[in-house]
Image (cartoon, helix red, strand yellow):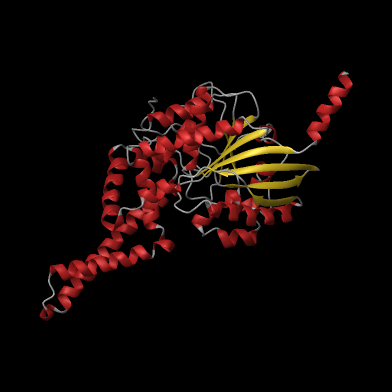
């Protein structure tokens, strides 16, 4: 009898491995289908490079996502990928227009400078702070160009009776022209991103707290399904959202069932956790870092100028304790996992590099997004023998370390 049970268990291990993936995007106003197309195209390329099979098909249900069928390491895998959407909140926060954006610029700059967070962030990593200063500098330069155009027009033709009102109109036309170029410049987009984080001094706005409750419910429902692993993936600003969702979920009590994993990619946690109002986030970071019932792997790359690469988000936020277990901080090492030809083509495309974690690598190492999300090994087993990056930063830099 024992032998028959053992054989059935072994046969179950050889059967189809099932996973539910819940993806939390960063601050992104675009519809979630862009992530399906990214997964489809990049997954097909990675499958060709790495020699496995991976296909997508539509997913049924009220929430947006897709199903993945794969065959890796001699085993069939079924993964249900669900996007936890908050792009509507992003769009709502971006609808302030030109004048509203300049008001946000002044308010955001004041929050980061007056709190002392800006100077600590610069000391921590210069790359993401250059990305943060980029929209502020460009907006100021655009305003100067607009004012110079208005002044020049008034000076050039005083005989035409051009007055201050018309000069203001010229300035407005110039600023409107810059705004229309933002699909290439990303100035307004980045400015609204940082302003959304700083709006309440690092605290989550009420509308976002409501959405976190929805996300938490979706993760709990996934944990009640017949899968081996529930994997939450957070990218960019979606990382600290994922931290709070999982911390609240675990505080409520986890049901018995599949393993729970968290993969954070390209995180910018210090942009929020270093602010005075982020007590809730700092508490969530500390809580999640000490839990045995979750696996947390944090992946960044020094070449990604939009992330705080190799910064332990718990430690640098000043809330690490002697009981800290997570995250395992590792590098995607773009310069090594991409061929010289591919690296030369991408290394100056800064915003594209910020999404490389979810794309194909033509010289993949132990990090492969598609094997993690659609492979037959859980996140914990895959990285259980992996040491953290020797270059990771664990020194506390945050000027505020109180936790709610």
Q: Nearer the viewer, residue 330 or 73?
A: 73
Could you tell me if residue 80 is visible in this image?
yes
Q: Who's the residue at 52% across and 31% down the image?
A: 246
On screen, 131 above or below 171?
above
Instruction: Check the picture and name the quadrant holding the C terminus.
Output: top left
In the image, 169: left or right of 393?
left
In the image, 331: left or right of 363?
left
Q: Who's the residue at 59% across and 28% down the image?
A: 294
Q: Position of residue 358 (x, y in %)?
A: 59, 49
In the image, 201: left or right of 308?
left
Could you tell me if residue 360 is visible in this image?
no
On screen, 248 above or below 335?
above
Q: Position of residue 129 (x, y in %)?
A: 40, 47
Instruction: Check the picture and name the quadrant holding the N terminus.
Output: top right
Q: Position of residue 354 (x, y in %)?
A: 52, 51
Identify the residue at the far bottom of this view.
Answer: 159
Q: Who's the residue at 61% across and 31% down the image?
A: 223
Label tally:
0
Residue 269: quadrant of the picture: top left
Identify the residue at the far top of this view.
Answer: 1
Q: Position of residue 217 (x, y in %)?
A: 52, 32
Q: Who's the residue at 40% across and 46% down the image?
A: 89
């Amino acid at each position: 009898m024992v032998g028959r049970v053992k054989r059935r268990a072994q046969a179950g291990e050889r059967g189809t491995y099932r996973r539910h993936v819940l993806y939390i995007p960063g601050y992104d106003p675009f519809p979630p289908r862009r992530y399906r197309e990214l997964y489809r195209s990049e997954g097909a390329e990675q499958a060709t490079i790495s020699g496995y099979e991976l296909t997508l098909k539509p997913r049924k249900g009220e929430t947006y996502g897709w199903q993945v069928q794969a065959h890796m390491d001699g085993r069939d895998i079924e993964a249900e990928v669900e996007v936890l959407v908050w792009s509507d909140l992003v769009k709502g926060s971006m609808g302030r227009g030109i004048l509203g954006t300049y008001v946000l610029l002044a308010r955001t700059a004041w929050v980061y400078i007056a709190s002392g967070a800006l100077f600590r962030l610069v000391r921590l990593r210069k790359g993401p702070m250059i990305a943060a200063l980029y929209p502020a500098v460009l907006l100021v330069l655009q305003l100067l160009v607009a004012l110079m155009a208005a002044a020049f027009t008034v000076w050039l033709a005083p005989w035409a009776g051009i007055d201050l009102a018309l000069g203001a109109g010229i300035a407005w036309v110039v600023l409107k022209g810059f705004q229309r170029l933002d699909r290439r410049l990303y100035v307004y987009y980045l400015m609204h991103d940082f302003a959304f984080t700083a709006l309440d001094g690092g605290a989550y706005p009420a509308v976002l707290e409501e959405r976190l409750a929805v996300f938490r419910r979706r993760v709990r429902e996934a944990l009640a399904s017949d899968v081996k692993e529930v994997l939450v993936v957070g990218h960019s600003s979606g990382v600290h959202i994922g931290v709070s969702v999982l911390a609240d979920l675990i505080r409520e009590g986890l049901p018995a069932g599949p393993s729970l994993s968290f993969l954070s990619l390209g995180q910018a946690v210090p942009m929020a956790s270093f602010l005075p109002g982020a007590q809730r986030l700092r508490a969530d970071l500390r809580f999640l870092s000490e839990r045995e019932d979750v696996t947390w792997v944090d992946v960044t790359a020094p070449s990604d100028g939009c992330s705080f690469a190799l910064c332990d988000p718990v430690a640098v936020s000043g809330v690490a304790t002697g009981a800290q277990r997570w995250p395992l901080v590792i590098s995607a090492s773009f310069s090594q996992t991409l061929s010289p030809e591919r690296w030369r083509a991408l290394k100056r495309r800064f915003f594209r590099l910020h999404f490389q974690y979810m794309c194909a690598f033509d010289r993949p190492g132990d990090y492969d997004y598609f094997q993690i999300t659609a492979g037959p090994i859980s996140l914990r087993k895959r990285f259980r023998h992996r040491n953290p990056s020797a270059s990771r930063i664990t020194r506390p830099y945050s000027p505020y370390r109180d936790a709610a």
